[in-house]
Image (cartoon, rainbow, N blue to C red):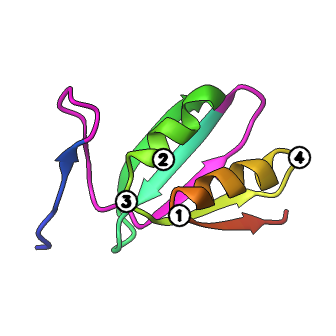
Amino acid sequence: MPKWTSRDVHGNGAFIMNIVTVGLDLATSVLQVHAVDWQGHIVGRKQLRRTNVIRYFAALEPCLIGMEACGSSPYQGRELAKLGHTVRLVHG
């Protein structure tokens, strides 16, 4: 059994596990986040408003983020890369 390291990122008992890969589905106003650990187990699914995306990812340790290539993805990718994340665009 792996030892989980977690921390109370939001100060209200919300713990974030060792997230290594995140799938980010971009939409007009609400974005869907799907996070997995190093074994591929789902550790989080969350809907975020566009205004909360940077704050959410700023609280995470650097990880790999995959997102669909669309009009806003280059901007979002640059902002997430500034936080230390590795961003990969998926062309569909």
Q: Earlier in the sequence, mark 1 or mark 3?
A: 3
- Residue 57's disc is 2
Q: Which residues are magenta?
A: 9-30
Of residues 43 and 61, which is closer to you in this image?
Answer: 61
Residue 58, how many percent across, how many down?
A: 45, 46
Residue 13 counted in the magenta span: yes
How far, Cα to Cα, is label 1 from label 3?
8 Å
Circle 4 is placed at which residue position?
A: 71
How far, Cα to Cα, is label 2 from label 4?
20 Å
Circle 1 is placed at which residue position?
A: 85
- Residue 45's disc is none
Q: Earlier in the sequence, mark 4 or mark 1?
A: 4
What amino acid is found at the position of numbered circle 3 in the picture? Glu
Q: Is residue 6 left or right of residue 84?
A: left
Circle 3 is placed at which residue position?
A: 61
Q: Earlier in the sequence, mark 4 or mark 3?
A: 3
- Residue plotted at (52% across, 56% down): 83
Q: Residue furthest right?
A: 71
- Residue plotted at (84% across, 65% down): 91
Dot 4 alpha-carbon crowd within 10 angstroms: few under 14, some 14 to 19, many 20 or more: few
Q: Earlier in the sequence, mark 2 or mark 4?
A: 2
